[in-house]
Image: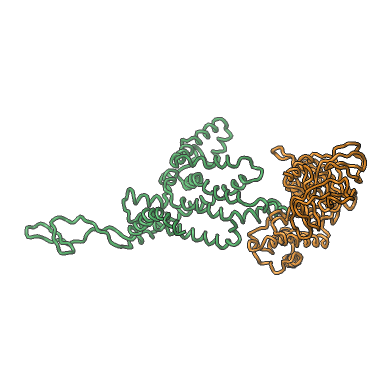
Amino acid sequence: MQNRPAPDAGTILSIRDVHVVFDDGFEALDGVSLDIGHNEFVTLLGPSGCGKTTMLRCIGGFERPTSGQILYKGQDIIPLPPYKRAINTVFQRYALFPHLNVAQNVSFGPDLRGEDKAKTAREVGRMLDLVGLSGFEKRKIASLSGGQQQRVAIARALINDPDVLLLDEPLGALDLKLRREMQLELKRIQRESGITFVFVTHDQEEALTMSDRIAVMRAGHILQLGTPEDIYNEPQNAFVADFIGDSDIMEGLMLRDRLVRFLGCDFPCVDSGFGENAPVDVVLRPEDVKLKPADDPAADGAPEGVVESLLFKGVHYEMKVRCGESVLLVHSTHARDVGTRVKLAVAPQDIQVMRKSEASEEVLRRHAERAK
Amino acid sequence: MKKNRALIVPFALWAFLFILVPLALIVWYGVTVEESVPYTEIAQADGSVAYRLEDGSVVAERPWQKRTVLSITNFKRMLEPTYLRLLARSLRVALVTTLVCLLLGYPVSLILTGRDFKHPALWLMLIILPMWMNFLLRTYSWMSILENSGILNSWLAGLREAAPAVDRLLNRMGIEDRVIFLYNEKAVVLGMVYNYLPFMIMPIYTVIEKIDRSLLEAAADLGANPVKSFVRVTLPYSIPGVLEGITMVFVPSVTTFVVSQLMGGGKVPLIGDIIQNQFGKSSDWHFGATLSLLVMVVVLAFMGTLNRVDKEDGEEVRIF
């Protein structure tokens, strides 16, 4: 796996082969390993049921792994209850105390530790300032909007000065504009406070925007761990490619090194090491598929298709191009009318060839349904 | 909305006939007494006696009619020490019962709502199950356990025979023959606690059960150990249930009469017994109604106080 920091002094949290089997026999986590560095922003990304929240709950102490280790600064914290861990959580629906006002919510941690009231009050002010809620001290929780509640939850966690902050889909309930704002805000807070963030989301765009590294999860496994660029540009299997961004995924045949056949044509590519005539999954990003006029002599031998639909998306047009049995998603700044015959061109470095994985079938089926 | 207003008619009718009318009757009985029609005796010429009524008419037979007149006599009587003492005892028994129910019921509710507690519904049913049996039957069962020749005493006797050490110990404690469990205030409290405990457990259980688990997790996350998390989250959130439980136990306790008659054997009369007596043996409905009004005022005052507690904490407690 790429860019994985060596488990040295830079590692604050080390998750080693963690398994969680629920009472009903469901394997929520099936051997997850992950090292997280100081002041790193790591996102656990995946569809619901992939185990990302369970992973977070294991770190927070609300779920006990069936086996494996969770090392915090080298010490296994699995036996420790949540209240003995120097880790704080921003819960999915914030879990603010409705019987307390904003200031009382934020000061919950310091009050428990019996800290000086005046000092705590100053700290609360500083935290509310940090999250942009100055002057909200006496407000009731019920009178706050979703975004404000979310920021109170962050302030309530941050005031304890944790080394690690866990965030469980904290932006899920917010509208798009507010979510974008909070993404930047969170990233700023993380950079300024020097706290390690472990962030759980199913929103790939959110993950790409905020993270230093992303762990894409499916069915209790980490499928790929890497920087947002790695994950987007070099997905290691069809599932990751499908989950991150829009993509065209189809079956292909690796004829030999650097030559792959899909859509009935042979394409030069940059991948090798698959052997000869190996079945593979081919992933194209919609913006990498170029449309040429059907009579363009430069596109000889390229697959031919017909534009089936055209949508204006602001920056680009989104077209669906039928090419035999398949329908490809194509993004382009040039619109082509529905019914236009085109040829498809893809640069060798834009073709992602990946080995078949257990998720291939499901992903391919979903993409094939687009053609119907 | 307007269309639906018609739906209230059956209940309004019901409330009028079976709540307001009886209440008015009680008030009426409470503020009136029966007295004999006044008359004066008049000696007749033939030596017999005739009776002249207030309206001037003269009848030959001594008037037997009674008439109902407004009077505060019964209120004066109600304030006699005898009755005030009875009321005080009733309040004491009810308060002790409520307190014991709370001390027993709260931990039970807490245990039943515990995260790792298996089959809470089954246990809850076991708690409620005795309520499916007749109230009298349950109380009689306690009597057969506790009475002087009851189950408990016969076990004790057996134990004395089997283990001389126990015998010596009991003798030293001054218990020579049998333990007298029944026919005192403690027995009455026991009977009431047994009968009313489910009414304490149910509302508290319901409220604690509704507390969002994530709030407890958040408290733990912020450093609260289980005790602190209880004090700062569970307790404040369960106050409405506690207040409801207190009402549900206190109000019937303060007005009951069956338990005190059976478990107290008539030695621990409560205000409810006296009221029942007025409508029964003494057949003085007027005084019975006056005493009922007294109890009603006490209960209303109690509930008013509770409501105020609820409201004072309201901002903090009312969450659902």
Picture colour for chain A: orange
Q: Does residue A305 appear anywhere in the picture? A: yes
Residue B268, compared with residue A357, is above or below; it is below
Q: Does residue A213 appear anywhere in the picture? A: no
Of residues A223 and B190, the one drawn nearer to the viewer in this rendering: A223
Residue A35: x %, y % from top left: 85, 48
Of residues B215 and B155, the one drawn nearer to the viewer in this rendering: B215
Q: Which residue lies furthest to the left in this view?
A: B46
Residue A197 sits in which quadrant? bottom right
Residue B74 sits in which quadrant? bottom left
Q: Residue drawn at (52%, 51%), measured in percent from left and top?
A: B98
Residue A335: x %, y % from top left: 78, 57
Residue B229, compared with residue A268, is above or below; it is below
In this rendering, position of residue A369 left or right of residue B102: right
Residue A236: x %, y % from top left: 85, 45
Of residues A141 and B111, the one drawn nearer to the viewer in this rendering: A141
Where's the C terminus of chain B, which quadrant?
bottom right
In this rendering, position of residue A353 left or right of residue B230: right
Residue B213: x %, y % from top left: 66, 50
Picture colour for chain B: green
- The scheme the figure's colours follow is by chain
